[in-house]
């Protein structure tokens, strides 16, 4: 075996590994939210793939050098033990190394961080097995996330409460939510009207032309928020024809996509509005700092170089695309972190660059 060829391969693998590291550092410097969306090691990420490929090439070449050296010098002796050591020892090391890379690629950086703090209460979910569920979406079985005073964060599939009662023979059931048929019908009709009303805004250019301004970055779980200021205090709370905020994200398919709307209460109150009983899960945020097309949480007004909001009105997300989280859930699990990277540039700046 030519040692020079093996050493050249090892050096090439090291160079590929370092190039992948450099590219990954560059990507993180361009998108500060990337760390929130990536797994520990994702082979779908080209920079991570370069790191892994470079490491694998380098390791294979170094193992080849070690095998050649051991065979030339008959490491372990001429007996059966020596032959077994030379034949199986280093391949076992190689398999273990490959296994560790595979395990790292399967690791999930679970959990998520919201840039804006918010207050919430207990959350439950209901699955509607009714004909009216078609109006809310067959693909989600019209799953509504319910809350009497806000929301909590629940992972996809963790709907309902696992309660046990002992009355002779114990039984298990989901938490019961006191919702009426009228509330279910009203919620389904509201979502259907909203979908129809915002359909023209599937094209984000139309939304911006009609006055919707981007006020947050493309956040994992809750998308980018575009507000229409003339709807803010128009006396028409929870009007599906006039949503105060539209929600867009690039995390689903890599293009700006309308995924829902957000409604704002007319004033700042202690108790949230209630339109569908326990179905609509309102929330609010505190100490927000809006700078350009981004938002973050600060400790005080003095730390905000832009527009500071001590407390927002109550807010309600309504997701109009299929989601396992629920129509009225605070988060949309499919975009936390999302199959594609979030937007790096504000939508207006990105679209102007594409036009040029």
Image (cartoon, rainbow, N blue to C red):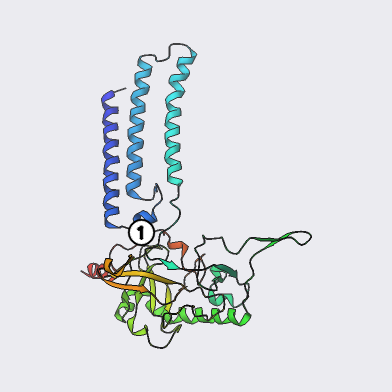
In which quadrant of the rendered image does the N terminus lie?
A: top left
Q: Residue at x 35, y 59 (%)?
A: 341
- Residue 189 can be seen, yes or no: yes
- Residue 257 can be seen, yes or no: no
| Front residue of 10 and 26 | 26
Q: Residue at x 34, y 69 (%)?
A: 288
Residue 308's x, y, as percent?
30, 72
In which quadrant of the rendered image does the C terminus lie?
A: bottom left
Residue 37 position by quadrant: bottom left
Residue 14's x, y, as percent?
28, 36
| Front residue of 144 and 271 | 271
Q: Is residue 292 above or below residue 40?
A: below
Q: Is residue 247 above or below residue 161?
A: below
**Is 188 left or right of 348, judged from the image as shown?**
right
Residue 295 position by quadrant: bottom left
Residue 4 position by quadrant: top left
Residue identified by numbered label 1: 341
| Front residue of 10 and 323 | 323
The residue at the far right in this view is: 168
Residue 121's x, y, as percent?
51, 68
Q: Residue at x 26, y 46 (%)?
A: 22
- Around disc 1, counting alpha carbons within 10 Å, would you say few (fewer than 14), some (14 to 19), or many (20 or more)? many
Q: Residue at x 35, y 23 (%)?
A: 66
Identify the secondary structure beneath mark 1: loop
The residue at the far left in this view is: 356
The residue at the far bottom in this view is: 235
Residue 301's x, y, as percent?
29, 70
Q: How many marks?
A: 1
**Is 315 left or right of 145, judged from the image as shown?**
left
| Front residue of 235 and 342 | 235
């Amino acid at each position: 075996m030519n040692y020079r060829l093996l050493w050249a391969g090892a050096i090439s693998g090291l160079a590929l590994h370092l190039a992948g590291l450099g590219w990954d550092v560059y990507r993180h410097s361009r998108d500060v939210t990337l760390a929130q969306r990536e797994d520990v090691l994702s082979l779908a990420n080209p920079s991570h793939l370069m790191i892994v490929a470079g490491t694998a090439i380098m390791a294979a070449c170094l193992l080849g050098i070690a095998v050649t050296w051991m065979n030339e010098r008959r490491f372990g002796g001429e007996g059966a033990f020596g032959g077994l050591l030379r034949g199986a020892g280093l391949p076992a090391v190689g398999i273990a190394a490959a296994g560790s890379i595979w395990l790292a690629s399967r690791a999930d950086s679970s959990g998520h961080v919201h840039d804006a703090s918010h207050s919430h209460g207990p959350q439950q979910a209901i699955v509607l097995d009714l004909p009216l569920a078609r109006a809310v979406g067959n693909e989600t079985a019209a799953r509504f996330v319910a809350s009497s005073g806000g929301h909590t964060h629940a992972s996809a599939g963790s709907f309902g409460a696992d309660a046990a009662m002992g009355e002779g023979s114990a039984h298990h059931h989901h938490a019961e939510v006191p919702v009426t048929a009228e509330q279910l019908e009203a919620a389904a009709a509201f979502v259907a009207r909203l979908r129809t009303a915002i359909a023209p805004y599937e094209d984000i250019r139309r939304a911006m032309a009609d006055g919707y301004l981007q006020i947050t970055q493309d956040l994992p779980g809750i998308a980018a928020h575009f507000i229409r200021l003339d709807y803010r205090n128009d006396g028409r709370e929870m009007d599906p024809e006039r949503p105060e905020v539209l929600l867009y994200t690039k995390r689903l398919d890599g293009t700006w996509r309308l995924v829902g709307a957000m409604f704002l209460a007319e004033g700042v109150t202690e108790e949230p509005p209630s339109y569908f009983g326990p179905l609509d899960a309102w929330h609010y945020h505190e100490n927000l700092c809006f700078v350009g097309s981004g938002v973050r949480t600060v400790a005080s007004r003095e730390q905000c170089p832009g527009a500071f909001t001590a407390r927002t009105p109550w807010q309600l997300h309504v997701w109009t695309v299929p989601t396992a989280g629920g129509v009225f859930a605070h988060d949309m699990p499919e975009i936390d972190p999302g199959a594609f990277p979030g937007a790096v540039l504000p939508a207006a700046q990105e679209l102007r660059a594409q036009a040029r």
